[in-house]
Image: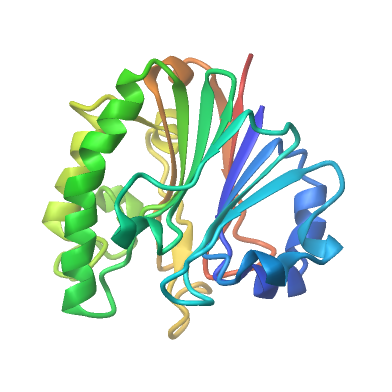
Amino acid sequence: MRIATFNANGLRSAASKGFFDWFASQGIDVLCVQETKAQAHQLEDALFRPAGYHVAFRDATTKKGYSGVAIYSRRAPDALVTGLGWEAFDEEGRWLEARFGRLSVVSLYLPSGSSAEARQAFKFEVMDWLRPKLRELLASGREVVLCGDWNIAHTAMDIRNAKSNEKNSGFLPEERAWMGALLGEDGWVDAYRHLRPAGQDYTWWSQRGQARAKNVGWRIDYQLVSPGLAARLEDCAIHPEPRFSDHAPFVVDYGD
């Protein structure tokens, strides 16, 4: 099983850069997209609904053309969960869970706090509220893959310039500690770090200056998996080229 996660920074924009041609060539079974930046009725063209895939969208309703998540899958989901019960979070289009038997694959878009203090405060509020929800999901007995843009680089290995970013949203001590708690006492497994213990690859680059050309990046796109899936992790790859977005697709292979 091959699962991919990708922040498109606008699915229509990524499509115009050839994303769906790339997607068709990758043998992906489930694709989780973040930042569709569109409403479902704007994505009815066949380009956005490739043959052989089922697609589900969870759009933002609070602000059109903002946020939004999607899941493409070869197999039709048995069920879809489009929110977790908090309107402020759900209506920004940040959670979509597809259930296939005992397996849940989630497309998650955690808020960014870089634009304003109020958004950072909301991000912290989301983090506090979300952690017990994720614990409940693990305790449910389901196998889970949490795909998405978490807007947090966990350790200094996950960011090019750690020291100079210690006071910036996405690498704040509180954010990193929260991520560490998910991967520590809560029991989630970071698929990339499990497979690449010494890896220093990135999934996002600022669009300012020469960040991408100089590989001054952050690893903020993850697949966190339930412990039972960790033994099935076989390989992974980040695809910085071709460029479809300021993020790169992250693909993980799971064995049977």
* Residue 7 as seen in the image, left or right of residue 161: right
Is 94 in front, or is 34? 94
Is 146 in front, or is 233? 146
Looking at the figure, which quarter contains the N terminus? top right
**Which residue sits at x=46%, y=28%?**
144
Is 8 in front, or is 135? 135
Residue 88 visible here = yes
Give the percent coordinates (x, y) of residue 14: 67, 69
On screen, 189 above or below 157?
above
**Which residue sits at x=70%, y=48%?**
55
**Which residue sits at x=27%, y=74%?**
114
Q: Quadrant of residue 253?
A: top right
Residue 151 visible here = no
* Residue 13 as seen in the image, left or right of residue 112: right
Q: Furthest residue to the bottom?
A: 209
**Which residue sits at x=78%, y=43%?**
53
Give the percent coordinates (x, y) of residue 124: 17, 58
Give the percent coordinates (x, y) of residue 234: 57, 24
* Residue 144 as seen in the image, left or right of residue 175: right
Give the percent coordinates (x, y) of residue 127: 22, 50
Looking at the figure, which quarter contains the C terminus? top right
The number of discs equals 0
